[in-house]
Image (spheres, rainbow, N blue to C red):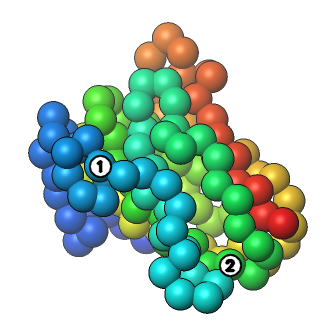
Amino acid sequence: GHDIQLPGDAGTITPAEVRQTPPFDNPGLREIEPGRYEAVMLGIAWIFQPNEIRIPAGSEVTFILTSTDVIHGFNVEGTTVNGMLVPGQITRITHTFRTPGEPLILCHEYCGIQHHTMYGRVIVE
Ligand code: CUA
């Protein structure tokens, strides 16, 4: 219930080879069919790459996520998108953004001295 999705079956990855391993060798937003997107994003101390995605309201986005280094959090404020980026683990979270706005993507797991600067944004137009 409550759109809670646990990691586990989305896949594993060798942390040292993230940048050579598809789809993480080409991070970014892709439209896979009208109104449906995949957002491949990396957590890197202390940024998200990319740190911004732009979609039309009503879009369904599947975030495909991992970390290149330490454990990061991934929360899109005001939504049920709330996951962990764990080295070696792929995290998939799907959400439909119905309301225009610019919610922040926040790292909500302490990941080092610049943790508080690690954020991004979903721009829902
Ligand atoms: Cu990444 Cu806190």
Q: Residue at x 44, y 17 (%)?
A: 112
Mark 1 crowdedness (10 Å alpha carbons): few <14, some 14-19, many ≥20? few
Question: Can you see residue 83?
Answer: no
Question: Horizontal placement of 61 versus 26: left or right?
Answer: right
Q: Can you tell which quarter of the image residue 5 is in?
A: bottom left
Q: What residue does disc 1 label?
A: 25
Residue 9 x %, y %: 23, 71
Question: Can you see residue 22?
Answer: yes
Comes first in the chain, label 2 or label 1: 1
Residue 12 x %, y %: 17, 57
Q: Which mark is residue 59?
A: 2
Q: Which residue is drawn at 41% across and 31% down?
A: 44
- Quarter of the image with the C terminus is bottom right
Identified by mark 2, the residue type is Ser
Q: Can you tell which quarter of the image residue 123 is in?
A: bottom right
Residue 71 x %, y %: 35, 35
Total labels drawn: 2
Q: In the rendered view, tell whether residue 92 sits above or below residue 34.
A: above
Q: Residue at x 63, y 65 (%)?
A: 80
